[in-house]
Image (spheres, rainbow, N blue to C red):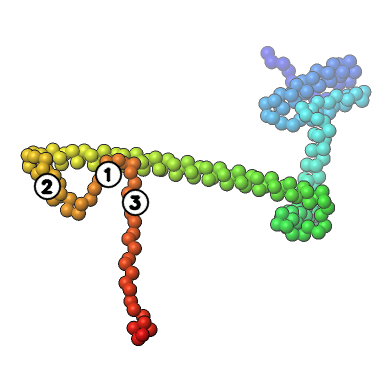
Amino acid sequence: MGRGKIEIRRIDNSTSRQVTFSKRRKGLIKKAKELTILCDAQVGLVIFSSTGKLYEYSNTSMKSVIERYNTSKEEHQQLLNPNSEAKFWQREAEVLRHQLQTLQGNHRQMMGEQLSGLSVKNLQDLENQLEMSVRCIRMKKEQILTEEIQELNQKGNSIHQENLELYKKVNLLRQENTQLYKKVYGTSEMAATSRDAFNPYGFHTSEDPQELIQLQLSQPEQDTYETSGSASK
C-alpha cells in the first residue's frame, strides 16, 4: 500500500518539527541544485529557521541574484505603471541621445575637426588611434591586391597552357599537311611550291611558342611642299 497523504499544518511537537525542517531543507536545496544544472537557471535560495538561523544557496553569487531580482522587480513595476513607463523610456532616449552626440564628436575629431578643446595627451591618443586605423587599412589593401595578383597569375598560367595546347594542334596539322603534300606532289620541291600556293601572303609561323610577335607602325613619308613665300621669291 502507498504512503498516506500527510496533512499540511504546523507540527506541534518541537522535536518532530525540527527533524522535518532539516529533511525538507536538504531536499529543497537538492532540488535547487538540480534545477540549476538541468535548466541552466540562476537560482538563489534563502531560508530562515524558526530559531532565526540562516540557510542559503546560490549557483553564482547571492548578491548578484538579489541585485537582479531588485532590477527586474523595478522594471516590472514600471511597466505596470504608465507614468513610470514613460519616464523609463525618456531616460532611455536621453541615454541614446548622449551616446549619439559622443559618437558624432569622435567622428569630427577623426576628421580633424573641433580639436581646439583637446589636450596634448588627447591629441596623442587620437594620433595613435588614427595610425592604427591606417595600418589596418593598408593591411587590408595589401591583402586584396595580393589576392588579385594571385588570381591574375592563375589566369595567365591557364592562358599559357591553352596556348601550348593550340601550338601542339598547329604542329599536328602542319605535319598532316606535309604528309599530304608528299603524297600528292611526290617531291619536297613540289611540296614547297604547293605550300607557297597555300600561303600566298608569305606569312611565317614561328617554331617557338614562347616567341612574341611584335608589330610596328611605319612612319608616313613627309612630302615637301614649297611655301607660297618661297614660290613667289
Q: Earlier in the sequence, mark 2 or mark 1?
A: 2
Q: Secondary structure at mark 3?
A: loop
Per the image, the residue denoted by label 3 is: 214
Disc 3: CA contacts within 10 A as few (<14), some (14-19) or many (>=20): few
Q: Earlier in the sequence, mark 3 or mark 1?
A: 1
Q: Nearer the viewer, residue 120 or 35?
A: 120
Residue 112 coordinates in the image, percent (x, y): 73, 57
Per the image, the residue denoted by label 1 is: 206
Q: Nearer the viewer, residue 42 or 4?
A: 42
Determine whether 181 is above or below 85 in the image.
Answer: above
Q: Nearer the viewer, residue 227 or 63?
A: 227
Residue 54 coordinates in the image, percent (x, y): 88, 25
Quadrant where the C terminus lies? bottom left
Q: Quadrant of residue 118?
A: bottom right
Residue 115 coordinates in the image, percent (x, y): 78, 57
Amino acid under disc 2: Thr
Disc 2: CA contacts within 10 A as few (<14), some (14-19) or many (>=20): few
Amino acid under disc 3: Gln
Residue 159: tell me if it is visible: yes
Give the Cα distance between marks 2 and 1: 20 Å
Give the Cα distance between marks 3 and 1: 12 Å
Determine whether 51 is above or below 163 in the image.
Answer: above
- Look at the numbered discs 3 and 1 and tell me whether their residues touch, using CB distance below 8 Å: no
In the rendered structure, the answer to whether residue 214 lies left or right of residue 140 reads: left
Residue at 83% from the left image edge and 18% from the top image edge: 22
Residue 123 numbered mark, or none: none
In the rendered structure, the answer to whether residue 195 lies left or right of residue 92 reads: left
Per the image, the residue denoted by label 2 is: 193
Determine whether 106 is above or below 18 in the image.
Answer: below
Residue at 74% from the left image edge and 56% from the top image edge: 109
In the rendered structure, the answer to whether residue 233 lies left or right of residue 194 reads: right
Give the Cα distance between marks 3 and 2: 28 Å
